[in-house]
């Protein structure tokens, strides 16, 4: 699903349309969202839903919260679409809202003193007995301890495969800064990786 | 160009395929850097496999429903806001009208007060005219007061004149003081009655 090229422009195919064309399309989609047109939202969901779920899941650690974050993001898009000014691509804007929604949920969870619930059920359905799954569980736990921005840069680059330029736009940081944050994050993870890695154990 | 251990971080920071290849070449000859690079790549390899998707047939209907509810709610909010504005405007208009009415009443009352003062002053003038007329008759008799009664009338009239003068000077500061007005009217009446007594007494004497 992610990266599809039909209908609205997507984050992963920036070269397909010219900037002006894309901007016009973005404004048109934003207007449709502001008007509450169900088709526009459905199109966004079809093109970006899977990636949105994945990003939310890798920030929040469980399916239930991830789906709540995606739903809340769509509501926020509906509320704020009339103020979209095409400064950033519409898709960038959507992912920015999603990530901020994830931060809100994480902060709410922290205020309530909740533990970050990692979705064990989901992992178990994927035959967690294998070494690879054990590594994934370990890395997910380590991600949970990262500060918000570091977690976002890591998730968007290493898991979702976005470029530093795209990450910079989404998180409102420079490309160089994104690169530096990724390096520092991986260094931080690396220190704990050896102690936690199932292979090392 | 040869790479040594302290360059490894820079290559990892760059992270592009060329830098990673050079890092790998160096790591092949350096066990410490090899360990670092292995962990580094293992983290990236594990992460690239963490892209998570799942079937969620209920999510889109949930989103669609919540957007529809949001639209309905915002439409209801618009009506609520409109109703609130209407109530505020209505209350404002009512308060303004009430204020206007109170102002008008106050104005009307002040007009009445002025009218009452005019009426009192007219009554006072009538007394003054009547008194002046009587004084023309009594002045010669009082100037040549022959009897002790006439002398006492003269003294009484002099006292009344003093009191009237003092009362008038007080009234100048507050024309609407009803108490002073009553006192003045009473004194005028008393003076009028006294002058009439003087006239009557003069006639008896003649």
Image: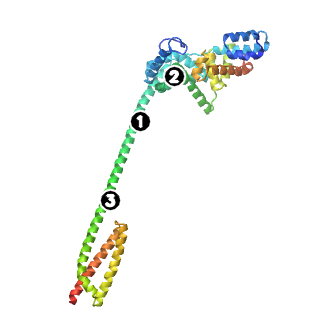
Residue identifier under label 2:
A87
Circle 2: element type = loop
* Image mark 3: chain: B
- Proximity of marks 3 and 2: CB atoms separated by less than 8 Å: no
- B158 sits to left or right of B52: left
Residue B152 seen in this snapshot: yes
Which quadrant of the figure has residue B201?
A: bottom left
Circle 3: element type = helix
Write the residue at 73% across / 21% down: A191
Per the model, the C-alpha gap separating discs 3 and 1 is 43 Å
Q: Quadrant of the C terminus of chain A?
A: top right
- Proximity of marks 3 and 1: CB atoms separated by less than 8 Å: no
Residue B136 in percent (x, y) is at 23, 80
Which label sits on residue B110? 3
In the image shown, does A128 or B86 lie closer to the viewer?
B86
Which quadrant of the figure has residue A188?
A: top right
- A158 sits to left or right of B95: right
Residue B83 in percent (x, y) is at 38, 37
- B168 sits to left or right of A52: left
Residue identifier under label 1:
B81
Per the model, the C-alpha gap separating discs 1 and 2 is 32 Å
Circle 1: element type = helix
Write the residue at 68% across / 19% down: A183
Above or below, B59 relative to B161:
above
């Amino acid at each position: 699903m992610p990266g599809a090229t039909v209908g609205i422009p997507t984050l992963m195919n920036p070269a397909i349309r010219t900037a002006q064309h894309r901007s016009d399309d973005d404004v048109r989609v934003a207007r449709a969202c502001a008007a509450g047109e169900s088709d526009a939202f459905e199109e966004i969901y079809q093109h970006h839903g899977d990636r949105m779920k994945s990003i939310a899941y890798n920030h929040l650690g469980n399916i239930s919260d991830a789906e709540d974050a995606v739903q809340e993001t769509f509501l926020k898009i509906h509320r704020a679409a009339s103020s979209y000014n095409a400064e950033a691509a519409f898709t960038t804007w959507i992912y920015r809202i999603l990530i901020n929604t994830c931060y809100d949920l994480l902060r709410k969870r922290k205020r309530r003193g909740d533990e970050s619930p990692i979705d064990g059920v989901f992992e178990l359905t994927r035959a967690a007995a294998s070494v690879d799954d054990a590594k994934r569980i370990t890395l997910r736990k380590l991600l949970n301890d990262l500060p918000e921005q570091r977690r976002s840069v890591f998730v968007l680059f290493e898991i979702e495969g976005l470029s530093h330029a795209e990450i910079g736009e989404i998180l409102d940081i420079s490309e160089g800064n994104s690169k530096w944050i990724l390096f520092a994050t991986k260094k931080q993870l690396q220190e704990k990786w050896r102690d936690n890695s199932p292979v090392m154990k | 160009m040869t790479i040594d251990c302290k360059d490894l971080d820079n290559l990892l920071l760059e992270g592009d395929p060329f830098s990673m290849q050079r890092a790998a070449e160096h790591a092949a000859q350096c066990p410490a850097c090899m360990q670092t690079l292995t962990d580094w790549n293992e983290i990236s390899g594990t992460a690239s496999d963490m892209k998570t998707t799942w079937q969620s047939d209920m999510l889109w209907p949930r989103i669609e429903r919540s957007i529809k509810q949001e639209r309905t709610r915002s439409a209801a909010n618009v009506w609520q806001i409109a109703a609130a504005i209407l109530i505020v405007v209505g209350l404002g208009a009512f308060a303004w009208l009430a204020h206007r009415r109170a102002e008008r009443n106050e104005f009307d009352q002040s007009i009445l007060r002025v009218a009452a003062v005019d009426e009192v002053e007219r009554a006072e003038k009538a007394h003054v005219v009547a008194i002046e007329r009587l004084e023309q008759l009594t002045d010669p008799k009082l100037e040549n007061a022959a009897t002790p009664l006439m002398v006492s009338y003269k003294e009484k009239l002099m006292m009344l004149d003093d009191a009237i003068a003092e009362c008038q000077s007080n009234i100048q500061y507050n024309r609407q003081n009803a108490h002073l007005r009553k006192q003045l009217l009473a004194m005028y009446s008393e003076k009028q009655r006294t002058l009439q007594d003087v006239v009557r007494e003069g006639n008896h004497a003649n």
